[in-house]
Image (cartoon, grey):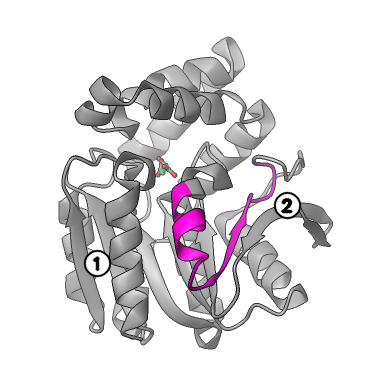
C-alpha cells in the first residue's frame, strides 16, 4: 500500500485503476477497507483513491487533528499524486471531511458524493454524547466503542445473512487505535456546521443514504438534497449506516451512473 508524507503525517492509500480520479473518504472509527467493493468495481472505469485518514488504518499517527486538518491532509495528498480535480466521496465523518474540503477548494472538486452523512454540526446533546464516548474509551477501550456502535452500522438483513461482512466491519472498528478514536470524537464534536455552505455548492452532487440508517437518516439526506441545487438523492433499501458494505453493488451502481453523466 503506497503512502505519502503530508503535513507531517504518512497517509496510506489504496490506488487502483486509471482515468478520472475518484477519491473515497471513510467514516469513524473505520478505514479505507469499507470501500473494498467499490474500489474493485469502480476502478474498472476510474482512478480510485481510498486513503486511510490520519491516525486511521495504516496511516499510523497519534497527533490530534480537526475535520478541517483532515481535509488539508487529503488536499496535500491528492496534489502530490496529481489527482486534482477529482470526484470526492465521503461516508459519514468522511462526508464532513469532504464538505470541509469543498468549502476551501471548490474548484478541485469536479463532483461531490455524500454518503450516509449530514451537513449540520453536533447538537449540545451530540457533543455530550461524544464526551461520554471518550470516557467509555478510557475506561473500556476500542472494543467497547465498537460494541456500542455495531448495532447501528449494518442493516438487519446483512447481520442475518452475511456474517463475513459483520466480522470484517467489527475487525476494522476494533483495530482503530484508541488515541485516534479520542481525537476523532473531539474533531467531530468541534466541527463546523456546513448547512450554510450547501446552497453555494456548484459541483454536481450525489447524495446516497441507507433507508435504515439510524445515525444519519434519510431525512438528513433529503435536507441536503433540497439545499444543494445540482443534486440527486439515492436511497438504498436494506442498508443502514455503512451502506457501502450493506449493499455494495447498489452503492457502486449509484456512483457509476452519476459519474457517467458528468
Ligand atoms: C461515522 O460513521 O463516521 C460517525 O458515526 C459519524 C458521527 O458520529 O457523527
Residue 150 to residue 199: above or below: above
Left or right, 149 with respect to 100, comes to left
Give coordinates of residue 250: x percent, y percent. Answer: 27, 54
Residue 12 to residue 102: above or below: above
Give coordinates of residue 21: x percent, y percent. Answer: 56, 75
Please tell me the numbered disc located at residue 185.
none
Assess whether residue 43 is covered by the magenta stretch. yes
Q: Residues within 10 Å of mark 1 (few under 14, many from 20)?
A: many
Looking at the rendered image, the quarter that the C terminus falls into is: bottom left
- Disc 2 designates what residue? 12
Span colored in magenta = 37-56
Residue 49 to residue 1: above or below: below
Label 1 residue SS: helix
> Which residue is located at x 31 percent, y 56 percent?
251
Q: Residues within 10 Å of mark 2 (few under 14, many from 20)?
A: many
Label 2 residue SS: strand
Question: Would you say residue 116 is visible in this rendering?
Answer: no
- Disc 1 designates what residue? 224
Ligand 1: give its quadrant.
top left
Give coordinates of residue 72: x percent, y percent. Answer: 66, 67
How far is the residue under mark 2 from the one under mark 1? 30 Å
Amino acid at each position: 500500500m503506497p503512502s505519502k508524507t503530508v503535513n507531517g503525517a504518512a497517509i496510506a492509500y489504496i490506488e487502483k485503476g486509471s482515468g478520472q480520479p475518484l477519491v473515497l473518504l471513510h467514516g469513524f472509527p473505520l478505514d479505507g477497507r469499507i470501500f473494498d467493493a467499490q474500489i474493485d468495481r469502480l476502478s474498472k472505469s476510474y482512478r480510485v483513491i481510498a486513503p486511510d485518514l490520519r491516525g486511521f488504518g495504516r496511516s499510523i499517527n497519534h497527533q490530534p487533528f480537526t475535520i478541517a486538518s483532515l481535509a488539508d491532509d487529503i488536499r496535500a495528498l491528492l496534489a502530490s499524486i496529481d489527482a486534482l480535480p477529482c470526484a470526492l466521496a465521503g461516508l459519514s465523518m468522511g462526508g464532513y471531511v469532504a464538505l470541509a474540503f469543498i468549502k476551501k477548494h471548490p474548484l478541485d472538486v469536479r463532483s461531490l458524493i455524500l454518503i450516509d452523512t449530514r451537513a449540520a454540526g453536533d447538537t449540545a446533546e451530540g457533543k455530550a454524547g461524544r464526551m461520554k464516548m471518550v470516557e467509555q474509551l478510557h475506561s473500556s477501550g476500542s472494543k467497547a466503542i465498537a460494541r456500542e456502535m455495531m448495532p447501528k452500522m449494518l442493516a438487519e438483513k446483512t447481520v442475518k445473512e452475511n456474517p463475513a461482512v459483520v466480522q470484517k466491519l467489527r475487525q476494522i472498528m476494533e483495530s482503530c487505535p484508541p488515541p485516534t478514536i479520542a481525537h476523532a470524537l473531539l474533531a467531530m464534536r468541534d466541527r463546523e456546521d456546513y448547512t450554510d455552505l450547501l446552497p453555494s455548492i456548484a459541483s454536481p452532487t450525489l447524495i446516497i443514504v441507507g433507508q435504515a440508517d439510524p445515525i444519519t437518516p434519510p431525512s438528513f439526506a433529503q435536507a441536503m438534497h433540497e439545499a444543494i441545487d445540482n443534486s440527486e438523492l439515492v436511497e438504498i433499501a436494506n442498508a443502514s449506516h455503512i451502506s457501502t458494505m450493506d449493499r455494495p453493488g447498489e452503492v457502486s451502481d449509484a456512483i457509476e451512473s452519476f459519474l457517467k453523466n458528468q
